[in-house]
Image: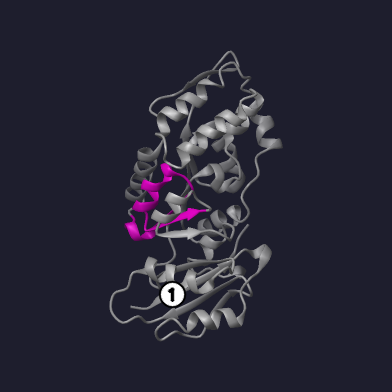
Amino acid sequence: MIHVVTLVSNPSRAALDDALVASISSHLPAACEPDWLAPGVAVDIAFAPVGEIDNRLVADRLRLELGDAPVDVFVQAAKGRRKKLFLADMDSTMIGQECIDELADFAGMKEHVAGITERAMRGEIDFEPALRERVGLLKGLAAGIVDQVIVERIRLTPGGRELVQTMRANGAYTALVSGGFTLFTDKVAAMIGFHENRANMLIVENDKFAGLVAEPILGREAKLASLTALRIAHELAVEETMAVGDGANDLAMLEAAGAGVAYHAKPAVAAAAAYRVDHSDLTALLYMQGYRRSEFKS
């Protein structure tokens, strides 16, 4: 079976050159000529291993060969790279912020809430009770503050819109699945172009947050359930699915996807996921599927 190594650097800091690519090729059996997907940014190197290989182990070895070079490595079978279902986490993945932390800032509690968020995302505490605790601290805050937070503080992760629009243009179904809140996901999903979004609902009373979140909470198991339900609904094999996230509540979804990608993730998540992006932006998920820069949509 033909496999392919995809090397990707951040498009704002192109780090690939012929010498580096040749060095990596020298460690691959029966390596083909490099196929540049974007000059200096992304390249495919097809190779023909003898027998079965562990793609993650090969990727780890190639990262060691790369040393300090800011380059992400993906190793996979060449067949079936392009996916037909894409699920994504929102906070610190499709956007650069944690929405609940930004809300808490308006209640004067950002540092405290951010500390709980960090522990939950690292898997040190359970997501559901941590979310209830943080939401409780928002009680009495004007719900209208959400619009201000979105305008002033929320920034889309570079490459995210290109990722979703390109996959959509090639027939994939896309869903934003967040442990955050529909007040944010509705608008972020529309900005990026997702087909749908799923998230938790903050309870509002008299135009203020009641300090409560509707049950059941969408967390780790609900994200996994969303992946399974959408895959079945679209009659897809596991191998045709992709998911991306950064926190512990994403891990079950990442492990169940055909291509689960940890994006600038917490250490335990990066270690467990089949694929990881440490340096690039979200266009890395297009390059790993074999898309060329000239194919990107926005």
When the figure is inspected, residue 172 is found, relative to residue 179, above or below; the finding is below
Query: Does 223 lie within the magenta span?
Result: no
The residue at which mark 1 appears reads as: 4
Image x and y of residue 10, in percent: 62, 63
Say whether residue 190 is left or right of residue 73: right
Residue 99 falls in which quadrant of the image?
top right
- Residue at x-position 53% and y-position 68%: 291
Residue pictured at 39% horizontal, 34% vertical? 126
State the image coordinates of residue 62 (x, y, percent, origin top left): 46, 72
Q: Which residues are magenta?
A: 236-263
The secondary structure type at the circle numbered 1 is: strand
Tell me the residue at 60%/27% (across/down). 104
Q: Is residue 42 left or right of residue 234?
A: right
At a point 36% along the width and 47% down the height, the residue shown is 252
Which quadrant is the N terminus positioned in? bottom left
Q: Can you say whether 241 is above or below 228 in the image?
A: below
